[in-house]
């Protein structure tokens, strides 16, 4: 009897070890570094404002740790959901996300912060539907490119149908308004359609239309014009329209090569608005320096590269849905991190976008972690298919 028990235990150990080998451990490592660094920097960057608002210096850190725990638990569950389930749920998930984008605009339901109504109060926390929409749109487009791949590559209708869905989604986001989320969603979807084989002239026409639409939106909204002019020359009005960017640039300047030391930032002491959310990277640059900032950028680039490597392996294994899923999430992480870091460094206009895995915010952190779990699920199933 003991021999049977030992043999069964040995087989289970071998199966567990074999399953572990099918995950992408370099991706796990890069994610873990960003995840832990984000927790540390949210705690460091938010102490002053948390103490003033709540009388508890680590208020935001405790909440971020709560979000982190929820994100890891949810990601563990997602890690064990087969990709075929996601392929079936693309449409329902998209409809749910669209419904929530409508709900957040209903007076009395959506919560307004800094002039934008982007959150649905859930008691102890707020939920941001735009983050779920980013996840859902990639799942939907990945399934669409599998079902209608030939139509996308050969007919205008195959290209127009998903664009209509995307336009409706972006209009809802702009009504909040959430210009940054709309831009990231549009860029991610365009990238996926390009990888899906859409004709070059259609893609070029779409880019031209998007540029014209963005220009029209900027011209129709005085605050967006103000943001653009502030981004071009923030020092022209450093105490009004250019205040946020000038304070971020001062943080970069103070950090020099190796930073002023963890917890020693001056800019987070009520000089730099949104230091623990949109401008967390500026605090990282000030406290930990240019060298560590470049290391963070390299980690984001590495995660994007691993997503495309995972996608390419899945494509070679004949798992087309999994491949587009990996490509889409790689594009999302790459575009959003590029925009956030670019805004912090003054090379892009100011946008209300978080830094994935790092900035304070439950919806963003949870969805970012779910994306990593989905990428790992793609790697897991691809390795199984290859074997």
Image (tube, rainbow, N blue to C red):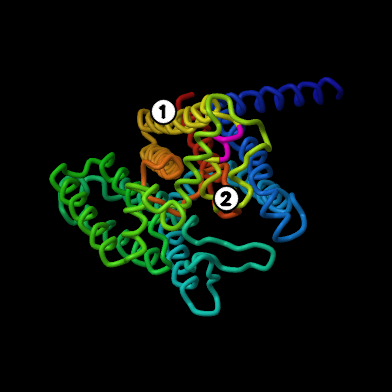
Mark whose residue sits in front, 1 or 2? 2
Local secondary structure at mark 1: helix
Residue at figure coordinates x 31%, y 47% from the top left: 145
**x then y, percent, for residue 245:** 45, 47
**x then y, percent, for residue 216:** 23, 62
Residue at figure coordinates x 15%, y 50% from the top left: 205
**x then y, percent, for residue 362:** 61, 54
Q: Examine the residues drawn in magenta and state their main secondary structure.
A: helix
Nearer to the camera, 243 or 66: 243
Q: What stretch is highlighted in magenta?
A: 283-287
Question: Quick one: which residue is furthest to the right in this view?
Answer: 2
Q: How many residues crowd around disc 2 within 10 Å: few (fewer than 14), some, or many (20 or more)?
A: some
Local secondary structure at mark 2: loop
Residue at figure coordinates x 28%, y 46% from the top left: 193
Q: Which mark is drawn over residue 309? A: 1
Answer above or below: position of 386 versus 356: above
Nearer to the camera, 16 or 253: 253
**x then y, percent, for residue 383:** 49, 27
* Residue 123 left/right relative to 375: right
Q: Mark 2 points at which residue?
A: 271
Nearer to the camera, 333 or 96: 333
Mark 1 and mark 2: Cα distance apart in space:
41 Å
- Identify the mark nearer the N-term, 1 or 2: 2
Answer above or below: position of 3 versus 188: above
* Residue 156 left/right relative to 118: left
Q: Which mark is drawn over residue 69? A: none
Question: Quick one: which residue is furthest to the left in this view?
Answer: 201
Count of number-bearing discs: 2
Q: How many residues crowd around disc 1 within 10 Å: few (fewer than 14), some, or many (20 or more)?
A: some
Residue 196 is one of the magenta-drawn residues: no
Nearer to the camera, 99 or 293: 293
């Amino acid at each position: 009897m003991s021999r049977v028990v030992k043999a069964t235990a040995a087989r289970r150990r071998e199966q567990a070890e074999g399953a572990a080998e099918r995950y992408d451990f370099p991706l796990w490592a890069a994610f873990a570094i960003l995840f832990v660094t984000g927790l540390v920097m949210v705690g460091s960057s938010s102490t002053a404002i948390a103490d003033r608002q709540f009388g508890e210096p680590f208020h935001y850190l405790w909440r971020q740790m709560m979000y982190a725990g929820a994100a890891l638990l949810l990601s563990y569950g997602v890690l064990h959901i087969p990709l075929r389930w996601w392929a079936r749920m693309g449409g329902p998930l998209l409809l749910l996300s669209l419904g929530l984008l409508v709900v957040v605009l209903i007076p009395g339901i959506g919560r307004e912060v800094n002039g934008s109504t982007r959150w649905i109060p859930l008691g102890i926390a707020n939920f941001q539907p735009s983050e779920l929409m980013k996840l859902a749109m990639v799942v939907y487009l990945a399934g669409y490119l599998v079902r209608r791949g030939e139509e996308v590559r050969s007919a205008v209708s195959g290209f127009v149908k998903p664009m209509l869905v995307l336009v409706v989604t972006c209009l809802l986001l702009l009504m909040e308004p959430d210009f940054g989320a709309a831009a990231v969603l549009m860029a991610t979807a365009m990238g996926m359609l390009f990888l899906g084989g859409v004709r070059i002239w259609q893609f070029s026409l779409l880019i031209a239309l998007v540029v014209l639409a963005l220009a029209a939106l900027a011209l129709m909204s005085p605050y967006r014009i103000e943001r653009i002019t502030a981004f071009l020359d923030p020092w022209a009005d450093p105490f009004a329209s250019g205040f946020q960017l000038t304070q971020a640039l001062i943080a970069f300047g103070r950090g020099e090569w190796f930073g002023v030391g963890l917890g020693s930032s001056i800019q987070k002491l009520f000089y730099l608005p949104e230091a623990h959310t949109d401008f967390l990277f500026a605090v990282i640059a000030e406290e930990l320096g240019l060298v560590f900032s470049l290391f963070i950028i390299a980690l984001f680039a590495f995660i994007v590269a691993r997503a495309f490597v995972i996608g390419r392996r899945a494509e070679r294994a004949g798992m087309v849905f999994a491949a587009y899923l990996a490509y889409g999430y790689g594009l999302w992480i790459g575009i959003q991190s590029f925009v956030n870091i670019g805004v912090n460094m003054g090379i892009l206009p100011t946008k209300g976008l978080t830094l994935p895995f790092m900035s304070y915010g439950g919806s963003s952190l949870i969805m970012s972690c779910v994306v990593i779990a989905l990428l790992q699920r793609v790697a897991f199933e691809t390795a199984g298919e290859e074997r």
